[in-house]
Amino acid sequence: MYDNPRLVIDSSNPPEPGSIVWRSPSNIAIIKYWGKYGLQLPRNPSLSLTLASSFTDTSLEYAINDNPSGSGIDLEFYFHQEENEAFKAKIQAFLETLAPVFPFLKQLKLVIRTGNSFPHSAGIASSASAMSALALCLCSLEDMLFGTLQEPDVFDRKASWVARLGSGSACRSVFPHAAVWGETQHVKEASNEYAVPVGDLIHDTFKDFHDDILIVSSDEKSVSSRAGHALMDGNPFAETRYAQARQRLPVLLDAMRTGDLDTFGKIAEDEALTLHALMMCSNPSYLLMQPGSVAIIEKVRAYRQATGRPLYFTLDAGPNVHLLYPGEIIHEVRAFIEEELKKYCENGRYQEDWVGEGPEEM
Ligand code: PMV
């Protein structure tokens, strides 16, 4: 879609060395993407809230390479100031797949320095923030060299498309407040290729909205998301699940437009439990919740029953519980976490997060 052989640096007029820095947040899916085909294309549309305090900072330094090796990309890579061979290999392979999109990358020496606002071992997925930050840096570099992405919408769409190739869910991190990724007739220009912003379609309640991430376990994931998506191909409930997501997207959008927290919360919780149920009945089966996750879910439901307060949960493909609630009940919820939920968290840890304004160029 974005292959462009014209994006080549004129060697008689090379750019001065420079650097580009982006901060990009993670996102939390309310309707989940689980199941894909082709090149990271989703089986169903998903909707996420863009977060704020869980982010990745990435700087991309570039200089013309006087001795390009021909095939490869010349890359130095640092994660939290240290060389990291495993991450470097992944990023290098990713950049090489992007050669037809950004042919100029092979003409440069690149140094990438990246780091997260949360500890790598926190069990918080970092691929969405990391891949969106990198995609934004690459699009800024293209624009700096060729002036081809001057229109903000054109820039964002390409960044979302590139981020998707790095990690599907990353394509939704490019936009403020909320984004939809995947074909649906209910959102203008929605596509499987990139996400589109839906922040303008939602009630202010969801712009002053919180997602406190209760770290039940910081262990490495027992199943990678690549393997998890692949398991959907043999799952007997797969088609029913994709249809369910397609049908509930307009229901969720309507609830988010009107500020209907009750409907929002029902869908959010059902989506989380459906994702986990699908993993439980995959072959092989995975049980990704831990006793602490279940205890927290039961406490949240009991709290809602007792107080009537709009406190809901969602889960990623792991044991940590995300608490979703509007800003107006923050004091009550934080007291509830401290008194009743923190004891289920590893070392009492949780990450306070909230709906944010999207990525920032630094
Ligand atoms: O982007 P991936 O391939 O890591 O998949 C993410 C899948 C979930 O986080 C479980 C759901 C989602 O839509 O973000």
Image: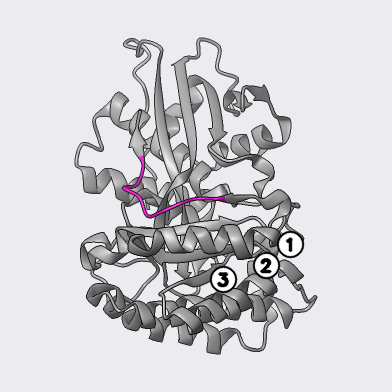
- The answer to whether residue 290 shows anywhere in this view is no
Judging depth in this view, the residue of 297 and 302 nearest the camera is 302
Residue 228: assigned label = 2
Category of crowding for the residue at label 2, using alpha-carbon neighbours closer than 10 angstroms: few (below 14), some (14–19), many (at least 20): some
- The answer to whether the residues at label 1 and label 2 have Cβ atoms under 8 Å apart is yes
* Vertical placement of residue 164 versus 277, above or below: above
Where does residue 290 sit, x and y in percent of width and height?
A: 75, 68
Q: Which residue is mark 3?
A: 34
The reply to whether the residue tagged 2 has its Cβ within 8 angstroms of ligand 1 is yes
Q: Which residues are magenta?
A: 351-359
Residue at label 1?
223
Tell me which amino acid carries mark 2.
Gly
Element marked by disc 3: loop
Using the image as rendered, state which of residue 8 and residue 91 is in the foreground.
91
| CB under 8 Å between discs 2 and 3 | yes
For marks 3 and 1, the one nearer the N-term is 3
Find numbered disc 1 in the image and state the secondary structure of the residue it sits on: loop
Ligand 1 quadrant?
bottom right
Q: Position of residue 34 (x, y in %)?
A: 56, 71
Main SS, magenta region, reads loop
